[in-house]
Image (cartoon, helix red, strand yellow):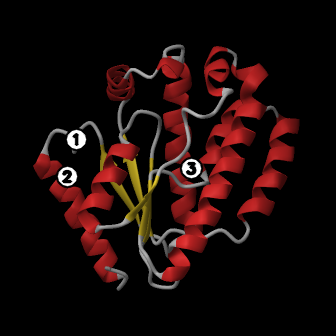
Amino acid sequence: MEGTPFITVEGPIGVGKTSLAKAIAEQFHFALLKEIVDENPFLGKFYENIEEWSFQTEMFFLCNRYKQLVDINNHFLVQKKPVVADYHIFKNLIFAGRSLNTIEYGKYLKIYEILTSDMPKPNVVIYLHASLETLLKRIKLRGRDIEKNMSPLYLEQLSIDYENAMNDFEAKHPDIPVLRFNGDDLNFVKNKNDLDYIFDTLSTSLKKRSIQS
């Protein structure tokens, strides 16, 4: 796995992670890893009643993301095939920390640490962030039924949690560059120049680490 590009795109709900990961996969000819969202049978109920359905929701995501990373490691990274993912598994701790009570989170953390102890780590993390107004507009635009009952207050707090988590990630992993892009200033879905700017920044980061494929 040494030297093989493994890029993860992160940020709060609605910021454009999947769109950017797809674009990077096409531009750089990377394999694409997309997180499972719509298949989570608890997610709709979670947005309606976070307290009641949080543990089931978070455990489903954790088990499925673990399985995806195992598959990616076995089928791509060990064969030195570059990968871009539209999430990093550490996001589980962000969501679980917001929605689980103290007892549930303690149990969850033990399972998380066991499952992720030997998981592949990314070479570069792309962090997308945006204002609450921008996030709400993009969530409404994509029109997912399961997100219709999402509380703006929940989304606002989630954005704060993401910012804190990314700062903590950078402090704990100084060897993994974090490329930050503001979704209020960049519209990489509609503006090719904005997308090219992200491509150029990523390419430069990969070349500095001598992992450009």
Residue at point 36% right, 31% down?
131
Give the labeled residue for mark 2: 195
Q: x, y (%) of residue 18?
A: 39, 45
Query: Is 101 positioned to the left or the right of 6 in the image?
Result: right
Q: Position of residue 182 (x, y in %)?
A: 30, 44
Q: Nearer the viewer, mark 2 or mark 3?
A: 2
Give the vertical position of 67 relative to 117 (above or below).
above
Q: Image quarter for residue 168? A: bottom right
Q: Which residue is mark 3?
A: 165
Left/right of residue 67 with respect to residue 203 in the rendered view: right
Q: Which residue type does callout 3 highlight?
A: Ala
Residue topped by disc 1: 189
Image coords of residue 6 (percent x, y)? 45, 69
Would you say 77 lies left or right of 119 here? left
**Quarter of the figure with residue 171:** bottom right
- 156 or 70, which lies in front? 70
Q: In this rendering, is residue 206 above or below 149?
A: below
Residue 212 versus residue 50 in the image, above or below: below
- Report the front residue among 91 and 178: 91
Crowding at dot 3, Cα within 10 Å, few <14 / some 14-19 / many 20+, comes out as: some
Labels 2 and 1 touching (C-beta < 8 A): yes
Residue at 51% across, 55% down: 167
Q: Can residue 121 be seen at all in this image of the molecule?
A: yes
Sequence-first tag of 3 and 1? 3
| Mark 1, secondary structure of its residue | loop
Does dot 3 land on a helix, a strand or a loop?
helix
Alpha-carbon distance for marks 2 and 3? 25 Å
